[in-house]
Image (spheres, rainbow, N blue to C red):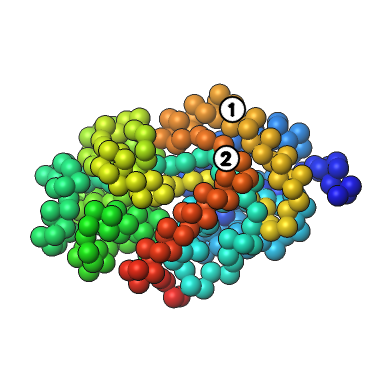
Amino acid sequence: MAAFAEYPERAINMVIPYGAGGATDISARNIAAALGEAVGKPLIMANVTGAGGATGSVAVQNAKPDGYTMLFARVGSHSVNPAMKATLPYTLDDFRFVTVYEINPVACAVSPQSGITSMDDLIAKVNEGGVTYSSSGVGSLLHLAAVMVLSEFGVADPLNQTTHIPQKGGGEAATAVLNGTATFLCTNTSAISNFVANQQLVPLMVTTKEPVAGFDVPTAADLGKPALHQLVGWTGIAGPAGLPDDVAAKWGEWMNVAAADQGFLDQMTSLGSVIEVMSPEDANSFIQTQYETFKKLVDDLGMRVEG
């Protein structure tokens, strides 16, 4: 282990597997200054996009496990994709997580014109038929979220009882509900907080145990649906499998310092994020549990994407 005694000796490459302006990119670039200061060496941020986060993830999977190539991993790339996509070129075992530091609660929402004001109203409409939901694409967190929520609320065959209207991104998914193309969506609170504040969308629930600022609605705990606590977005940092223990431990220390930075906290909290730094052990356990929850749902309902 002597070779790692001086880690880090040089700049560290940080791969962001999604494009500029998305949730992962915003999170990564907001923490970059405080994290770079904690690390004491430059962080070279690079967006390596494509295949729903898989291209950037594979670049880190194939890197030397020496701590000099790390990944900003996301719920899509490392919980939803492994559960949903049969042909994914990696598994969770190909990575070692050093932390999850940001949780994005999920909220379900409708337009004010829908006349729906509660989850009971929504489920009643679903059972009548003709209800649609939007998402950021087939196999996305939003796709899985809507189906998981309906399933937890007792809709026996949500895939056939409702119609999925996939869009090209989270913004377009929200717009589809705003303009009446879709009845509802379940998405990260940060994606619709402005619409909720402006009373353009009506939230029905949040999936967390604790209430979310700006969303005056019941939590999954309030509604007696604790299984939905697993249904959250998140951002974390991972290296390739085989990352040494002492390197992982250093990342744990750095993240505790960086995530306590007041500027970072203020910025992310204003976006509806919950900043909570998990240890490497807790992060791996959290992601594994989330993956197993999603995989069971996908298998039970036959949602696996084979292409």
Q: Amino acid at mark 2?
A: Met
Q: Residues within 10 Å of mark 2 (few under 14, many from 20)?
A: many
The residue type indicated by label 1 comes to Ala
Identify which residue, 144 or 17, lies in the foreground.
Answer: 144
Q: Residue at x 42, y 71 (%)?
A: 305
Residue 265 drawn at (x, y percent): 52, 28
Residue 287's label in the rendered image is: none
Extreme residue toward the right, this view: 2
Residue at 22%, 40% in the rendered image: 202
**Quadrant of the rendered structure where residue 136 is?**
bottom left
Q: Position of residue 158 (x, y in %)?
A: 24, 63
Image vertical order of residue 97 relative to residue 249, above or below: below
Query: Which residue is most to the bottom?
Result: 306
| Residue 124 location (% of width, % of height) | 13, 53
Query: Would residue 191 be visible to someone looking at this image?
Result: no
What kind of element bears circle 2? Answer: loop
Considering the image in quadrants, where does the C terminus appear?
bottom left
For mark 1, give the secondary structure.
loop
Depth check: give the residue in front, 43 or 126.
126
For the point 20% across and 46% down, the residue is 119
Who comes first in sequence, dot 2 or dot 1?
1
Q: Which residue is mark 2?
A: 278
| Residue name at image x 22 percent, y 64 percent | 156
| Residue 30 found in image quarter | top right
Q: Is residue 303 above or below residue 80?
A: below
Front position in the image: 54 or 45: 54
The disc placed on residue 260 is 1
Left or right of 215 on screen, residue 79:
right
Residue 108 image point, x, y percent:
28, 46
- CA distance separating discs 2 and 1: 13 Å
Instruction: Identify whether 212 is placed above or below 43.
Output: above
